[in-house]
Image (cartoon, rainbow, N blue to C red):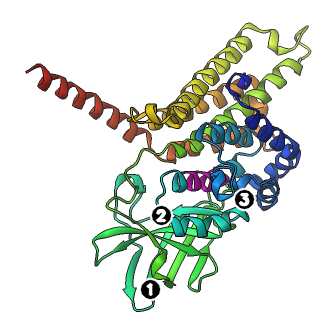
């Protein structure tokens, strides 16, 4: 099914590289979930094949993969281990967005690229307990004050995915003197930084999304790298499609398990495997339908974003793809569990893990309610424009 969406030799090459380390990543995935430990070993395997720099442009020493390429690879990786995929996805997305839009000065981009080529891991730290989701516009409680030596940062960031292995924190902070939000690039070895291991959840247990605490952290003046009026920025960011790609990968894994089960499980009450039963075939057919709808939505938006002319026409399509894929993935996992039955609830069965982890997608940005509201507002605004033109 996914063959339809592979359209270059470079994609096939990277899919083959992932396939070569699949077994080890899959084997690590059970302990990652069961022990709620960060998949350090899997990250190292990805570093060894140069995966961390796939979205870094070639002129900076990276692979220069597009959003479409990234989505294809991240979906595949998530079918091996969703914790590894989601944690890695934030680094890939940050790097892709940063360099595609040249958000920093040329000198800083050149300097940072040297670290990325060596496998550095980075993530934006924007979430805080006091603000809720940063996409809703809350002002960060983390603050920055200017001194003669640079900036002093104080605050606490939550949901800091991949915190155990992050080399750099791209941290939002409120700058009182400028009445703006700034982003500071901070090396994890800077004095005053600590990781508070608060990540105690039932979903995506291995993403290491702990709190990062900043206490009187001194940052050089030049590492105030971005200034924005809005905590979440203002550009349409196709690199965020790594999020639904991960949940589509979970759905694919659930589908594969359920169909393998259905074609091999034959209770003694039947003369053939349960895959011959009409109601099981109906569930399998629905799973295939939801997977196909999800892929066309996700890859269609990614392809549009990669085309500069079509990108200008995008409005809410990134959010639509995330909404569609995430909710379809929930449905797919549910149907897979109906095929397998009570066995799917056993701790040793991966479906119970997929069931828990796929629900985390509802809480990754953008949230469903915001997507629906924006679609309504956009439709209303379009009608107002039409009315003005007619008058």
Q: Between tags 2 and 3, which lies in front?
A: 2
Residue that mark 3 sits on: 36
Main SS of residues in magenta: helix
Question: Crowdedness of circle 1 by 10 Å Cα count: few (<14), some, many (20+)?
Answer: some
Which quadrant would the C terminus be assigned to in this image? top left
Front-lying residue, 107 or 53: 107
| Location of residue 378 (image quadrant) | top left
The reply, left or right, for residue 43 in relation to residue 167 is right
Which quadrant would the N terminus be assigned to in this image? top right
In this view of the protein, can residue 212 be seen by the observer? yes
Residue that mark 2 sits on: 104
Image coordinates of residue 213 in percent, x first then y, are 53, 76
| Location of residue 140 (image quadrant) | bottom left
Which stretch did the figure color magenta? 88-96
Report the residue at 52% width, 50% height from top. 100
First along the sequence among labels 2 and 1: 2
Report the residue at 83% width, 52% height from top. 28
Report the residue at 81% width, 14% height from top. 275
First along the sequence among labels 2 and 3: 3
Cα separation, mark 2 vs mark 1, equals 18 Å
Front-lying residue, 77 or 47: 47
Question: Crowdedness of circle 3 by 10 Å Cα count: few (<14), some, many (20+)?
Answer: many
- Assess whether mark 1 and mark 2 are in contact (beta carbons under 8 angstroms): no
Image coordinates of residue 219 in percent, x first then y, are 50, 82
Question: Crowdedness of circle 2 by 10 Å Cα count: few (<14), some, many (20+)?
Answer: some
Residue 150: mark in rendering: 1
């Amino acid at each position: 099914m996914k063959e339809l969406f592979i359209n270059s030799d470079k994609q096939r090459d990277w899919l083959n590289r992932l396939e070569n380390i699949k077994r080890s990543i899959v084997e690590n995935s059970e302990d990652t979930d069961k022990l709620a430990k960060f998949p350090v070993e899997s990250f190292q395997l990805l570093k060894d094949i140069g995966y961390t720099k796939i979205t870094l442009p070639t002129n900076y020493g990276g692979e220069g993969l597009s959003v479409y390429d990234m989505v294809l690879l991240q979906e595949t990786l998530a079918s091996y281990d969703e914790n590894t995929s989601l944690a890695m996805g934030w680094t890939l997305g940050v790097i892709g967005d940063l360099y595609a839009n040249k958000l920093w000065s040329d000198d800083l981009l050149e300097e940072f690229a040297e670290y990325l080529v060596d496998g550095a891991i980075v993530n934006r730290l924007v979430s805080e307990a006091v603000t809720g989701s940063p996409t809703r516009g809350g002002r960060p409680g983390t603050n920055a004050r200017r001194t003669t030596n640079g900036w002093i940062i104080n605050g606490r960031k939550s949901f800091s995915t991949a915190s155990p292995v992050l080399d750099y924190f791209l941290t939002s902070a409120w700058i009182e003197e400028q009445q703006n939000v700034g982003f500071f690039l901070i090396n994890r070895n800077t004095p005053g930084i600590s990781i508070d291991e608060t990540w105690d959840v039932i979903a995506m247990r291995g993403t290491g999304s702990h709190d990062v605490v900043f206490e009187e952290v001194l940052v050089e003046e030049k590492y105030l790298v971005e200034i924005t009026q809005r905590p979440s920025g203002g550009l349409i960011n196709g690199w965020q499609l790594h999020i639904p790609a991960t949940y589509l990968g979970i759905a694919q894994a659930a589908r594969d398990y359920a169909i393998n089960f259905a074609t091999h499980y034959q209770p003694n009450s039947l003369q053939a495997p349960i895959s011959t039963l009409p109601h099981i075939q109906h569930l399998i057919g629905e799973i295939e339908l939801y997977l196909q709808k999800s892929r066309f939505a996700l890859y269609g938006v990614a392809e549009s974003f990669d085309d500069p002319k079509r990108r200008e026409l995008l409005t809410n399509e990134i959010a639509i793809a995330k909404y569609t894929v995430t909710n379809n993935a929930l449905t797919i996992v549910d149907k897979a569990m109906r095929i397998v039955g009570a066995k799917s609830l056993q701790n040793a069965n991966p479906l119970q893990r997929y069931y828990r982890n796929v629900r985390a997608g509802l809480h990754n940005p953008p949230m469903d309610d915001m997507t629906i509201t924006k679609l309504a507002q956009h439709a209303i605004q379009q009608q107002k424009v039409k009315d003005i033109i007619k008058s």
